[in-house]
Image (tube, grey):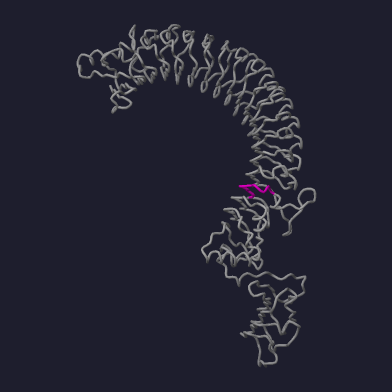
Amino acid sequence: MLFKPYNPFSKTPKRLTVECSGKPDFNLLSRSCQWCMFTFPNLIELDYRGCPLPVGNQSFEQLLSSFLTTWKQLLFVSRLSLFNNTYLTERAPLGPELFAGLSRLKYLTITDLTGIPLDNPLLFKHLSNLAHLEFRGRNLINGTVFHPLTGLSKLLITGMEMSVLPEGLISNLPSLNLLELNENQLERIERFAKLPSLKFLDLSFNQLVTLQEDIFDRLQMLQSLDLSANNLTSLPSRLFKHNNKLKNFWIDNQQGAGLQLSDGLFAGLANLQNVSLSGCQITTLPAGLFTGSTKLTFVDLSDNMLQSLPETLLRDLYRLKELYLEDNVLFRMLPDTLLRDTRQLRILDLSYNSLTTLSKALLVSKKFLRELHLQHNQLHVIDVDAFKSQPTSLKMLNLSHNRLTLHENSLDVIHGNGAVFNISWFPRNLRTLDLSHNQIPYVSCIDISLQSPKLDHLNLQSNNITQIGFNTTRTNSLTHLPKEILLADNPLNCDCLSFPLVTFLQAQSKANKYFPLKGLQCAQPLTLRGKKPQDVPPKKLICPTDASSGFCPVECNCYKRAIDRGAIVNCTAANLTHVPIIQNASKIDCDFTELYLDQNMLHDLTNVGEGWNQIRRLYIANNSLATLTGDSLPEQLELLD
């Protein structure tokens, strides 16, 4: 046997644990170990684990007096925990003598008294001050055993594996404030007896399939009800007709074939504040579900099978602050007037649906909206006025995993009523903006800095971004860039258009200055794939010329190079027998030409084309040139190979 004070170093320990590994003989202990007597003058908590319970007319007071210096040490015990005492206890009903002398007991926990009946109607008659009674695990409770506990305020019965609540068990408890019957196997419950003080009822994690319409009729003070994790498939329309004080209702994660809600189920519940209907396989909602529930502040309809919502579902819910509709199958667009009355809305979650369009009317007047979750939809149209009512309130916007482009053909584009839409149309006070996993081809650092000055985190990963707009003459406008801009997994084209960004990044790196672009790598051309832009030699940043310019000979490939404004005409190994016509470099906004004629079959250099004399670098190795005269060379030639 183990005697363990909670604080063995205290002169006056307040908690004592008595734990047995075998069946002790308390009388023998008393006779053979006089020095084992213990004194706990301030004992208020007793934890009795694995030891036999008193038998016959013996009480705890008498049983433990074998090793306590005086029985009065138990007089002030207010907490008693009985844990796993079955193995060493006789299988006989317990009587009221068990708790004699523990009149000040307020908290009693009984765990796993398997096979020992707890049905004596006088079992708790000595516990007039008991306020909290908890049964955990397999216990045999029946009859009117709780009737003497008229002052009991909290009763918890969990894990008992009972399928039916014994008749009359939960009755004659005028002070009961909280009742937890969760984690049992309850399949059916008759109408509850009158419990005039009951405010909190937990019936979660049972096997309930149906509820009688009058089951809660006599619980008129009920404020919180939890029916989560059952098998309910329907709720009667007048289920709460006598529960007008109800504030909180949870019925999440029903395992049945799909929960059907009657029209007007919550109608007229003027004190209702929180409703959670998540994970119930609900397919439709009646329009009048919340009629008159004007104090609602929280509604969770997530993880269901809703395809659409009635326009009037949220009518008159002026105090609604949080609405969760994620993980449904809502498609296309929501009714424009759905949120019309929800002017206090702070959080709206529409993620993991199939919405395609965000209209300008949906969020009108939502001036307090802070968080908007729209990730994992099919959004490809957002009206330019969609966020007009949230110029300063919206702090977090998640639009990831959609089909947004925001730009087309490398230009700001038309999205919604023919108006231009780009990052600058997002609310200016945004702190977090997630646009990852979309189809955006282009962004501008200047737009981000100027239009979203308070943005901390911008996620643009996994888009189609081939170019990042950057103007070196406006770098003073970059002081308000986000702390991080995530750009990994984009097909960035490290060409001549990237030259301003690349050179700026290289300068920042050389000066050991931080710049927030993260994860950016070249995807094109193939020779630069995987390189960070700041590691690319600027001379390799080239762009193919536009065929419509008429600059490039048909036999050749032509490029523009940003670092020196040079035009590259590459005719290497083109089977040429004569020099092609070289156009003026100014045609493609360049200052000179670099011409590659190596590995051909040229016999002479013919001075042709108005751009011939703009050639500064000429490569003619591996041809059939017999002689090369000075007057055949370009006037501005600097390098001949």
Point out residue 176 in the picture as x, y percentages from the top left corner: 52, 14
The quarter of the picture where residue 96 lies is top left
Q: Is residue 599 above or below residue 206?
A: below
- On the rendered image, what quadrant is the C terminus found in? bottom right
User: Magenta segment range?
Assistant: 426-435
Q: Tell me: 133 left or right of 480.
A: left
- On the rendered image, what quadrant is the N terminus found in? top left
Point out residue 466 in the picture as x, y percentages from the top left corner: 66, 60
Point out residue 212 in the picture as x, y percentages from the top left corner: 64, 15
Our reading of the magenta stretch's main secondary structure is: loop
Q: Is residue 105 above or below residue 459?
A: above
Residue lying furthest right: 418
Q: Is residue 220 visible?
A: yes
Nearer to the camera, 217 or 473 = 473
Q: Is residue 622 visible?
A: no
Residue visible at 60% across and 72% down? Answer: 539
The quarter of the picture where residue 502 lies is bottom right
